[in-house]
Amino acid sequence: MAWSPDGHRLASASGSWNGRDKTVQVWDSASGNALLTYNGHSSWVNAVAWSPDGRRLASASDDQTVQVWDAASGTLLHTYDGHGSDVNSVTWSPDGTCIASGADNGVVVV
């Protein structure tokens, strides 16, 4: 899970409380209500990260991709591949211009 920069939302990897369902979900942190579900990965989602401005969300998956989403609409903006292995972590640079991700094969991609 990851808090949004403003603290009003949470993003969860694989969305479902009882298992991995290949989604990213965004939740209202005050009410606990689900706000959006992002569908696009073809395998389990392992990690999520908000951009510093809170406008985008990145997700890392066993489908060997990192996906970037518009946080407000849930629209898929971009898919990055090239790891050649399950992607387990993702983070944004402090200025929001770069994403770094790490995979099972020990490769870090920026």
Image: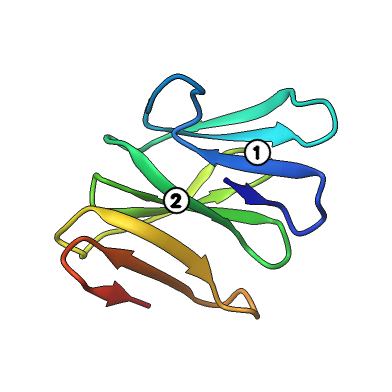
Q: Which residue appears at 56% of the width and 78% of the height?
A: 93
Number of numbered callouts drawn: 2
Residue 104 percent across, percent down from the top left: 21, 60
Up the image or down, 45 lies above or below 86; here it is above
Question: Where, quadrant-wise, is the N terminus in this rendering?
Answer: top right
**Amino acid, disc 2:** Ala
Label 2, secondary structure: give it.
Answer: strand
Q: Position of residue 72 (x, y in %)?
A: 70, 42
Residue 56 x %, y %: 61, 55
At label 2, counting other C-alpha atoms closer than 10 Å, the crowd grade (few under 14, some 14-19, many 20 or more) is many
Query: Label 1 crowding class (10 Å Cα cut-off): few <14, some 14-19, many 20+?
Result: few
Left or right: 53 with respect to 49?
right
Q: Tell me the number on the disc at residue 47.
A: 2
Horizontally, is 14 left or right of 96 in the view?
left
Q: Circle 1 — which element?
A: loop
The amino acid type of the residue labelled 1 equals Ser
Residue closest to the eye, 74 or 11: 11
Labelled disc at residue 73: 1
Q: Earlier in the sequence, mark 1 or mark 2?
A: 2
Q: Tell me the quarter of the image containing the C terminus.
A: bottom left
Q: Position of residue 77 (x, y in %)?
A: 49, 52
Nearer the observer, 57 or 2: 2
Viewer-side residue, 100 vs 97: 100
- Horizontally, residue 84 falls left or right of residue 15, namely left
Identify which residue is drawn at 85% across, 33% down: 30
Measure the C-alpha gap from mark 1 to mark 2. Answer: 19 Å
Disc 1 versus disc 2: nearer the observer:
2
- Quadrant in which residue 19 is drawn: top left
Residue found at x 50% / y 29%: 15
